[in-house]
Image (spheres, grey):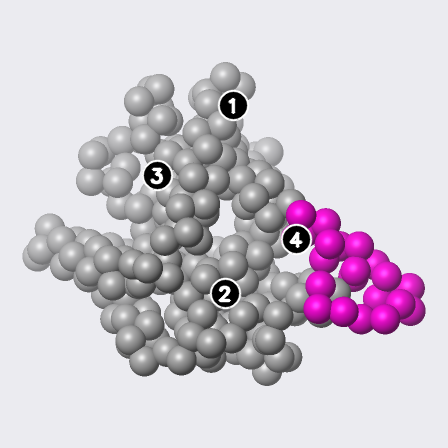
């Protein structure tokens, strides 16, 4: 990989990780379309680590309150909305971690076909449009119940299909359950932290068996650019989502899926 490829892929990862348009689809398709060499697990872990740094930093105050409240609840203290939200993030993460760990090799070998990515992009994009169009959008993330969290958490399993989008499917279910656009996005981003961390741990174990031509300087550049682009994406998405809605992302997904199918056939 040359520096231009590193810059483009790192920025692309940061931007698409939190927008409802599927980062995995873009990172699979772009190198394939441009005949770029495989970027490998080392680079993949690095740019995801950059995205993780961005979301943890952005929500640092909320995360600190949640951790402190969660620890107090374990010690027998009175539960509050922050400790409950911490439990919801943990519970909501369990399904995708369990399924992803168990079926990782099957997912990577079977579900990366371009037509699957195209179909997932279109189908789940239209589902996002339906959720946004008919949503009540009155609840915030602190009003979630155990049933809500299990529904959203189980929906994350679908994001193991490239093209689905982890943020897209969790925001979709949040909207269906009556959360506001901003609350749906905030809970989706909170769920992203343990998911990205768990994925990074799993891939890091495999990473040590891979001989990578990427040096430390290139990895640092990838982490930095991914973190910056992800941080900007989170900031402006949360500021603008109530105003612009989900339609721009739905149209993008449908056009992307259509373009993939057109190139294939």
Residue at coordinates 36% horizontally, 53% vertically from top-left? 240
Look at the picture and state if 174 lies above or below 231: below
Residue at coordinates 33% horizontally, 59% vertically from top-left? 243
Badge 1 local density, few (<14 within 10 Å), some, or many (20+)? some
Span colored in magenta = 61-82
User: How far apart in space, not on screen, are marks 2 and 4 (Cα)?
Assistant: 13 Å
Q: Secondary structure at mark 1?
A: helix
Horizontal and vertical percent position of residue 77: 89, 67
Residue highlighted by disc 4 = 62
Q: Is residue 93 visible?
A: yes
Q: Secondary structure at mark 2?
A: helix
> Residue 16: within the magenta?
no
User: How far apart in space, not on screen, are marks 3 and 2 (Cα)?
Assistant: 24 Å
Horizontal and vertical percent position of residue 56: 60, 44
Q: Secondary structure at mark 3?
A: helix
Badge 2 local density, few (<14 within 10 Å), some, or many (20+)? many
| Disc 2 to disc 4: CB gap under 8 Å | no
User: How far apart in space, not on screen, are marks 3 and 4 (Cα)?
Assistant: 26 Å
Q: Secondary structure at mark 4?
A: helix
Q: Which mark is residue 220?
A: 1
Question: Which one is in front, 235 or 211?
Answer: 235
Quadrant in which residue 14 is drawn:
top left
Residue highlighted by disc 2 = 183
User: How far apart in space, not on screen, are marks 4 and 1 (Cα)?
Assistant: 27 Å
Quadrant in which residue 1 is drawn:
top left
Residue highlighted by disc 3 = 12
User: How far apart in space, not on screen, are marks 1 and 2 (Cα)?
Assistant: 32 Å
Residue at coordinates 30% horizontally, 63% vertically from top-left? 246
């Amino acid at each position: 990989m040359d520096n231009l490829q590193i810059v483009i892929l790192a920025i692309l990862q940061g931007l698409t990780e939190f927008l409802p348009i599927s980062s995995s689809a873009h990172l699979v398709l772009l190198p394939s379309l441009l005949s770029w060499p495989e970027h490998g697990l080392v680079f993949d872990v690095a740019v995801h680590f950059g995205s993780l740094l961005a979301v943890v930093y952005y929500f640092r105050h909320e995360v600190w309150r949640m951790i402190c409240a969660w620890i107090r609840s374990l010690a027998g203290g009175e539960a509050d909305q922050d400790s409950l939200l911490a439990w919801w993030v943990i519970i909501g993460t369990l399904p995708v971690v369990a399924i992803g760990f168990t079926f990782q090799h099957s997912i990577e070998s079977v579900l990366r076909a371009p037509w699957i990515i195209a179909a997932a992009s279109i189908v789940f994009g239209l589902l996002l449009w339906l959720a946004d169009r008919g949503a009540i959008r009155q609840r915030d993330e602190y009003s979630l119940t155990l049933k809500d969290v299990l529904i959203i958490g189980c929906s994350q399993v679908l994001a193991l299909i490239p093209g689905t989008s982890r943020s897209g499917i969790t925001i979709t279910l949040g909207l269906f359950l009556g959360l506001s656009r901003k609350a749906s996005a905030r809970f989706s981003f909170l769920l992203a932290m343990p998911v990205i961390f768990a994925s990074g741990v799993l891939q890091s174990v495999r990473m040590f068996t891979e001989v990578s031509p990427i040096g430390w300087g290139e990895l640092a550049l990838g982490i930095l650019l991914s973190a910056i682009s992800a941080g900007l994406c989170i900031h402006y998405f949360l500021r603008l989502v109530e105003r612009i809605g989900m339609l721009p992302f739905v149209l993008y997904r449908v056009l992307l899926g259509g373009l993939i199918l057109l190139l294939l056939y």
